Amino acid sequence: MATQSSAWTGEKPRKAGNGAGRGSAARSGEKVVPISHTGSAQDIHRTPPHSVEAEQGVLGSMLLSPRQAIGECVEKINEQYFYVPAHQTIYSVLVDLWNAGQAIDLITFTQVLRDRNLLESVGGAAFVTSLFTFVPTAANLEYYLEIVREKYILRQIISAATESVRRAYEEQDEVNNLLDEVEQSIFAVGEDRFKGQMLSMKDQVMEAIEAIEKLYERKGGITGISSGFVEFDRMTSGLHPSEMIVIAARPSMGKTALAMNIAEHVAINEKLPVGVFSLEMSSQQLVQRLLCSRARVNLQKVRDGFLGERDFPSLTAAASKLAEAKIFIDDSASLTILELRAKARRLKAQQDVRLIIVDYLQLLRSTSRRAQDNRQLEISEISAGLKGLAKELKIPIVVVAQLNRQPEQRTGGKPRLSDLRESGSIEQDADLVGLLVRPEIYEEDDEARAEKAGEAELIIAKQRNGPVGEIPLTFLKEFTRFETRARNVEEPREAF
């Protein structure tokens, strides 16, 4: 067979070569399909990228060394990575036999194909025999797998692009929604194809046991990203991938300050890249806050220009630290949820951000036509979009949100989950909801206000995977900085 000349001598197959191997491909069921229904006449009958030799090299290696080779293949590809249908069938049967612990050789494998009425459809006994001799050893399996994977990715790109062209020509979708889905489909092509797939209970149990063992080794330590607040980390074990964490409060409670304190800690102390989408404040305003917070310089003095001699060295030291921090701020006003998702994907791809902060949710807009006249539905779509983004990027997203006026009607102003403004969907989508309150704001008496000055509480009103309770904080207003506050003996730690 002409296509086997390189394989007989143990040479590696060529990466480019869709035209090579036509004889063997035809016998083993190679298909020629159109690339695009809307493309040019030249493109319509082109064969999608693939390498018959590399696919047969993988199958030959699996047959020659089933115990080692099949295990390696299962970790890296599945039957969909093969272009030729007969190759997909052969791969699936080999994996079945390997999973069942059955012996695999020329006689047993051929007989299994015959028993399943698959032998003729894959090319007959002669073709199966040729696979056993297609490669002299399984030494080049890794190389063959890489070629098969590359060709598969190229086909996925073509498929995603073709579908995008079709939908664009049909003009049935909202443009912004289509743009978001097209970007997501292309972005997903480069992702590990085995992440997020359905797992058997055995696989999930083993993964759970490994996670439990890690928790046991940590003895209550942080399993996610540290927020910088000891009590918060103790109650939540940190900020975890795919989680949507909501920090909600009435205006002027310091919710932006708390979110930026977390960003500062993660970027400087944990040395992890952080993305910030600020829809309310400019990047310069946020940077000034970060500088004053870290330097412990009164923000109002900076704004008024009345700085003391001791303030400049502190600001210089803080600036030096912040300049090295990987905090990326986007202060685009009036973002839509689709625009934010697109920006976040690029930020993740380019900077590998490990945490995203959105300030704040109610300033985002939806482009959905059905939500144009329904604010509650619009907020629901935005909330679901943020949760979906956290899952897609596999990073925690801290979302700042506003509460309605209900806390002001209560003594002490303590907020509740039901106070989340304009939609109950935020509560449903969030993995964790922290309600921030500063009691001094609700005190009418000057003496009582002075007594509670600086006191703050972060009420963990919902935590999908942990307890709820109240976390005492101290708010240093002049520095726009929150710090952990020592508990009074009578203060409750948590409630389940």
Image (cartoon, rainbow, N blue to C red):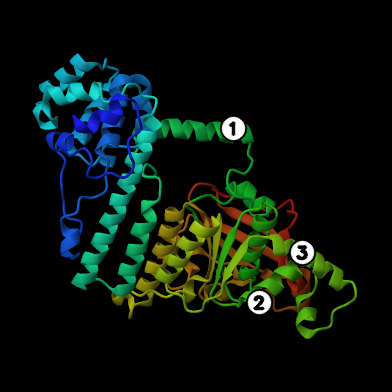
* Amino acid type shown at disc 2: Gln
| Residue identifier under label 1 | 216
Q: Earlier in the sequence, mark 2 or mark 3?
A: 2
| Residue identifier under label 2 | 284
Say what secondary structure mark 3 lies in: helix
Seen in the image, is 21 located left or right of residue 331? left
| Alpha-carbon span between mark 2 and mark 1 | 44 Å
* Amino acid type shown at disc 1: Tyr
* Numbered mark located on residue 324 in the image: none
| Alpha-carbon span between mark 2 and mark 3 | 16 Å
Say what secondary structure mark 1 lies in: helix
The answer to whether marks 2 and 3 mark residues whose Cβ atoms lie closer than 8 Å is: no
Mark 2 crowdedness (10 Å alpha carbons): few <14, some 14-19, many ≥20? few
Say what secondary structure mark 2 lies in: helix
User: Can you see residue 440?
Assistant: no
Q: Which of marks 2 and 1 is in front?
A: 2
- 155, above or below 205, in the image: below
The answer to whether marks 3 and 1 mark residues whose Cβ atoms lie closer than 8 Å is: no
Decide which of 459, 288 is in the foreground and name it: 288
Q: Residue at x 28, y 73 (%)?
A: 174
At which x and y percent is residue 369? 29, 76
Q: Which residue is drawn at 21% across and 17% down?
A: 106
| Alpha-carbon span between mark 3 and mark 1 | 38 Å
Q: Which of marks 2 and 1 is nearer the N terminus?
A: 1
| Residue identifier under label 3 | 320
Decide which of 494, 383 is in the foreground and name it: 383
Q: Which residue is drawn at 60% across and 50% down?
A: 225
User: Can you see residue 43?
Assistant: yes
Q: Which of marks 3 and 1 is in front?
A: 3
Decide which of 214, 428 is in the foreground and name it: 214
Q: Residue at x 40, y 32 (%)?
A: 142
